[in-house]
Image: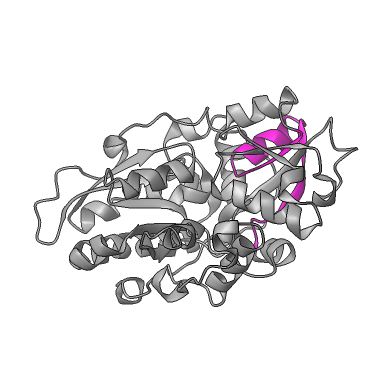
Amino acid sequence: MRSSLRTTAAAASAVLALCSLTACGGSSDSGGKSGGGKVKIMVGGLDKVIYLPAMLTQKLGYFQDEGLDVQLLTEPAGVQATTSLISGDVQGVVGFYDHTLDLQVKGKQVESVVQLSHTSGEVEVVSTKAAGDIASPKDFAGKKLGVTGLGSSTDFLTKYLAVKNGVPVEKITSVAVGAGQTFISALQQNSIQAGMTTDPTVTAILDKKIGKVLVDMRTPEGSEKALGGPYPSSSLYMNTDWVNGNKETVQKLANAFVKTLRWMDTHSPEEIAAKMPADYAQGGKELYAKSIGATLPMFTSDGVMPENGPETVERVLKAFNPNLKNAKVDLAKTYTTEFVKKAG
């Protein structure tokens, strides 16, 4: 079930340091089954609701059911997770699809194998103190704007909102502030006047009355209004060579994630919250469930890339990214539906 709740929730603790979370659910000794094996997946912030399917799949035991030994790791920003993938430290990343386009023009072939979402799930918030000066992205000029990391998807989208609203990229300052408490502190201390983040950070900011929503891209309607179409974001993406050499394992991963998406589609925010680690609900179970409800509209129910989604992402990136502006991008190579369409 999908909820349109827009109520607030408390944030999870400051973004987790790089750590192994294999023991957080599922089994770590089932890799010996045929077609299984150990797989390391880096997540751009495990406690972020936009990446909830990764931990939920572990907690539901679906990796174990597929005979996989999946180790979930976390980094505070998707750009850092991508670096781990390219260096071979991990086999997959749960992060934003837009990195596949950016990497392709840099000579790296990476593809989304499970598309978890069809909107960005991101929200541009403005501090209560600066709300009088920033009524829309048209007012971004001369402002310090928070992003999870420089070169991250939040950085990409912030620059697009600026350019779309007539503010040149060189007129804004992106400030890497992470998510969770570090983002909140930056907003409170006026280190940033506005910034892009996700739940549960958004709901914490609203609950504390230290900020207001400026642009909401958690729903298909919000994505259409801000970005002009569906914006596939959260996904499981992997190096294409690794995918081609490990198709049985990739199929098992796709099976597990699609099962989770279907489970999410038929359960309430409260039921989903109950499956997640207790320390994700820093402000209490009720508020955490509400933050999940506010973000649920972003997720797909089948893992399939939304129609025209890649084209929207390409258009957004080319609006401000000099690396992509005049580059030829083969969108067909940035994702595959081969595995999700076979998922039982």
Q: Position of residue 221 (x, y in %)?
A: 70, 66
The residue range painted magenta reads 193-219
- What residue is at 67 percent from the left and 48 percent from the top? 123
Q: Position of residue 343 (x, y in %)?
A: 31, 71
Residue 5 is at least partly visible in this image? no
Q: Is residue 107 above or below residue 122?
A: below
Q: Position of residue 90 (x, y in %)?
A: 28, 46
Please give the count of numbered marks on the rendered protein: 0
Residue 65 falls inside the magenta stretch: no
- What residue is at 33 percent from the left and 49 percent from the top? 86
Left or right of 89, for residue 96: right
Left or right of 117, for residue 131: right
Q: Position of residue 246 (x, y in %)?
A: 19, 63
Question: Where is the C terminus found, in terms of image quarters?
Answer: bottom left
Question: Where is the N terminus found, in terms of image quarters?
Answer: bottom right
Q: Quadrant of residue 8?
A: top right
Q: Is residue 236 above or below residue 84?
A: below
Colour option used: one colour
- What residue is at 84 percent from the left and 51 percent from the top? 138
Residue 197 falls inside the magenta stretch: yes
Residue 221 is at least partly visible in this image? yes
- Residue 61 versus residue 228: which sits nearer the camera? 228
> Looking at this rendering, what residue extends furthest in the top direction?
189
Q: Is residue 12 above or below residue 276?
A: above
